[in-house]
Amino acid sequence: MVKEMRMDLNPSSLHKRHHIFVKFAVSFLLLGLAFRLFASDSFRISSSVIEAPPLADTNTLTDSLPLSSSSSSLPAEAPSSSDSVANESQTFPNGAAECDLFTGDWVADPSAPAYTNATCPEIEDHQNCMRNGRPDSGFLYWRWNPRDCELPRFDPDKFLDFMRNKSLAFIGDSISRNHVQSLLCILSQVERAVEVYHDEQYKSKTWQFPSHNLTLSVIWTPFLLKADIFEDINGVSSSEIQLHLDKLDQTWTEQYKNFDYAVIAGGKWFLKTAIYHENDTVTGCHYCPGKNSTELGFDYAYRRALKTVLNFMTDSGHKAFVFLRTTTPDHFENGEWFSGGMCNRTAPFKEGEVEMRDVDAAMRDIELEEFEKAASVGAENGVILKLLDTTRLSLLRPDGHPGPYRQFQPFAKDKNAKVQNDCLHWCLPGPIDSWNDLLMEIINRGSRQ
């Protein structure tokens, strides 16, 4: 032991130890400096995320009722290759990060809806589910929650103030009318609209909000194109629809330059039997056996229609703020609307529990593709085009339709009565109210850019 200690104490050994110690110290200092630089960069990155202003919830509601539950084991849906178009269209105002408003989940929310069937006079009878006797109310207590960011609740005061001296039009079919009624009901908590116009069938209407000089319109044009339609009030047709794929419906185009904001939408009507005209000549049809005409398919007509509509908007010289709302899926099960189909679920689906139907997926793909082409042209011409992609979030709400309660007390006389169901339109209040949360948020972002 003593010998070993003496060896350690000799000068040569001490010099070597000193040299090693110096090397170790320098290495330690360099390592510490590198760590400090890394930590500093990491802190700056974290700080930039923390300092990004959060989107505040602007309108908290009260009251609660117990929620209903349901289950499903339908196959999971593969994401569409076109989803990135919708995702890329929505960003934070400061451009710091992407925020996809249209991918998320429906989460339980004990807050009461912004209105009821008792407080809103604009609800049509066939969407007034509670008055018509729907026994469950759990469908009222869910809110749409995007995964990447917070979606503020619709603030009617802020919306009316922002829209002062402006005009907004919803252009499309009865789903557009359903949407505008939801908006009217929410806004009625601040100011009641005054109806100033309606067509003979009460399908197109115009309202004014006198205190804010806001004009709100709904224009019924189910194809957005010129069309000769031979249906009665119950949807029974006496002849094929004659659809002009190269001519827009003047019902809306003649008014278009009056609108500061417009929400356009098409979809389900293109699935109906129709004869197609181009250049005043019959060029084909959709689902017209025995007519000796070329089957072109609804997808051909729908793409042609959207091209014509979007080209008109981007080239018209009118610099409006335009939304293209994507197609709305229905939730008929065990049949269609005319063959005993029903929708009796009482809770939302979760992601992966439901598959989008082929026709809805095809329509949405067309919408995303044509929107992407038109948005770049619109930007060059000063026209703002935004996507309102309500398809996937609506797909998750099979519980939000009137079903048999499109009629007043349908089972009052016979609890086993066979009743036609409505699994396409939405109860008011109901899931469609969230479309207006999205609408306002996109308008807010557009005004801040």
Image (cartoon, grey):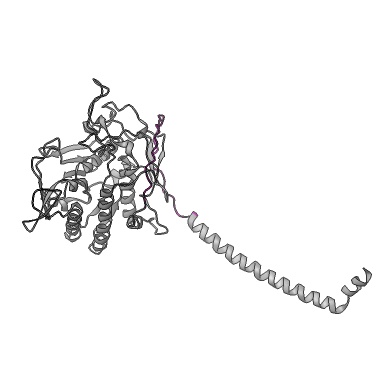
- Total residue callouts: 0
In this rendering, would 285 be left or right of 423? Answer: left
Q: Is residue 238 above or below residue 270?
A: above
User: Percent x, y for residue 181?
Assistant: 24, 38
Farthest residue to the bottom: give it: 12
Asked if residue 57 lies in the magenta stretch, the reply is yes
Residue at 80% across / 77% down in the picture? 16
Farthest residue to the left: give it: 280
Quadrant placement of the C terminus: bottom left
Asked if residue 228 lies in the magenta stretch, the reply is no
Q: Nearer the viewer, residue 129 or 47?
A: 129
* Main secondary structure along the magenta-highlighted residues: loop
Residue 219 at least partly seen: yes
- Report the magenta residues as a range: 50-78
Which quarter of the figure has residue 371? bottom left
Residue at 18% across / 53% down in the picture? 297
Residue at 55% across / 60% down in the picture? 43
Q: Which of 64 and 161 is in front in this view?
A: 64
Which quarter of the figure has residue 384? bottom left
Which quarter of the figure has residue 193? top left
Residue 190 at least partly seen: no
Q: In this view, does 59 lie above or below 41?
A: above
User: Percent x, y for residue 144?
Assistant: 37, 43
Q: Nearer the viewer, residue 29 or 100?
A: 100
Quadrant placement of the N terminus: bottom right
In this rendering, would 285 be left or right of 359? Answer: left
User: Percent x, y for residue 299?
Assistant: 21, 54
Farthest residue to the top: give it: 413
In this rendering, would 130 be left or right of 45? Answer: left
In this rendering, would 410 be left or right of 247? Answer: right
User: Percent x, y for residue 242?
Assistant: 9, 49
